[in-house]
Amino acid sequence: SLFAQSTPEARGLGMTSQRARDRLIDRLEAEGIRDRRVLDVLRRLPRHLFIEEALSSRAYEDTALPIGKGQTISQPWVVARMTEALIEFSVPQRVLEVGTGSGYQAAVLAALVERVYTVERIEELLRQARRRFRKVGIENLRSKHADGKLGWPEEAPFDAIIVTAAGAQIEHALLDQLAPHGVLVAPIGPPGEQQLLRVRPGENGRISEFLGKVSFVPLLGGVS
Ligand code: SAM
């Protein structure tokens, strides 16, 4: 099965990729990730299938890795933290992701929620991500090649929106497509000064809160 495949690093250490993932989960817990649902998904999902084979020996390090076109697969801790923040108060049914990248974050979400919509502006990255979704058997996900700053108006409203590239502010189009009870998580700010921002419903309208420092590639406009 996919889940029994070993990585070169894991083979060298006499470990299966499951052992490598178990170690990563121990580390994420030690670094403050608490949500069992999130930890369980990361324990099961083969991250090495979301990067090129030459890098697969590093798949279970807690680090971002290049995926081509100047982009990265996010650090597992960041994926875990953003997912945890998104589902903390209730598990959303319909989630929009801006920035498919490798597809890993979308795959994590697909294991937790009813339906995932993910948008990527670089066609080649999206093509690769789609192959991976098929390979790991994800069926409750739709993806499109477009500028995610515009959201996915035809499928709105969303119960949750996650942005995986950093902008100067939250795009209005995205807030417009968020359901009244919806939660949005996005990195905001210039390189070196980014914060993870969460917007969620409060008693008198939406509450914004900063969840800590992060480091993301920039949210760009248009498609390529
Ligand atoms: N969620 C991804 C993962 O799990 O691999 C993270 C990928 S990377 C940190 C961010 C991605 O956002 C890149 O693939 C980049 O091309 C994409 N991106 C940047 N601006 C975008 C936009 N306006 N619309 C859609 N995707 C965008």
Image (cartoon, rainbow, N blue to C red):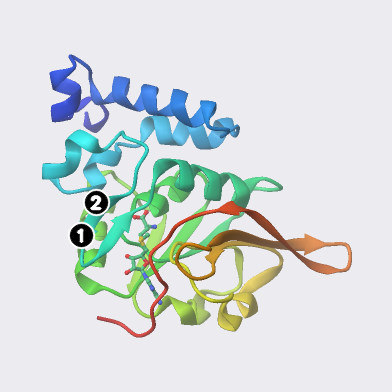
Mark 1 neighbour class, 10 Å CA radius: few under 14, some 14 to 19, many 20 or more: some
The C terminus, quarter of image = bottom left
Disc 1 marks which amino acid?
A: Gln
| Residue furthest right as drawn | 204
In the image, residue 11 above or below residue 28: above
Q: Secondary structure at mark 1?
A: helix
Compared to residue 114, the image places residue 118 above or below, namely: below
Count all numbered tags in the image, as a single digit: 2
Q: Residue furthest front?
A: 192
Above/below status of 135 relative to 17: below
Q: Secondary structure at mark 2?
A: helix
Q: Residue at x 14, y 21 (%)?
A: 11
Q: Residue at x 43, y 46 (%)?
A: 108
Left or right: 81 as drawn, with respect to 68: right
Task: Return the residue nearer the eye: 107 or 200.
Answer: 200
Instruction: Look at mark 2 in the image and give the residue it sits on.
Output: 132
**Label disc, if present, on residue 128 of the rendered structure:** 1
Callouts 1 and 2 close, C-beta under 8 Å: yes
Gap in angstroms between the C-alphas marked 1 and 2: 6 Å
| Residue 106 visible in image | yes
Residue at 45% across / 43% down in the picture?
111
Left or right relative to 156: residue 73 = left
Q: Position of residue 70 (x, y in %)?
A: 24, 66
Q: Quadrant of the N terminus?
A: top left
Would residue 196 be found to the left or right of residue 143 on screen? right
Residue 51 locus on image (x, y percent): 22, 48
Say which amino acid is labelled 2. Answer: Arg
Q: Is residue 203 left or right of residue 105?
A: right
Residue at the farthest top position: 14
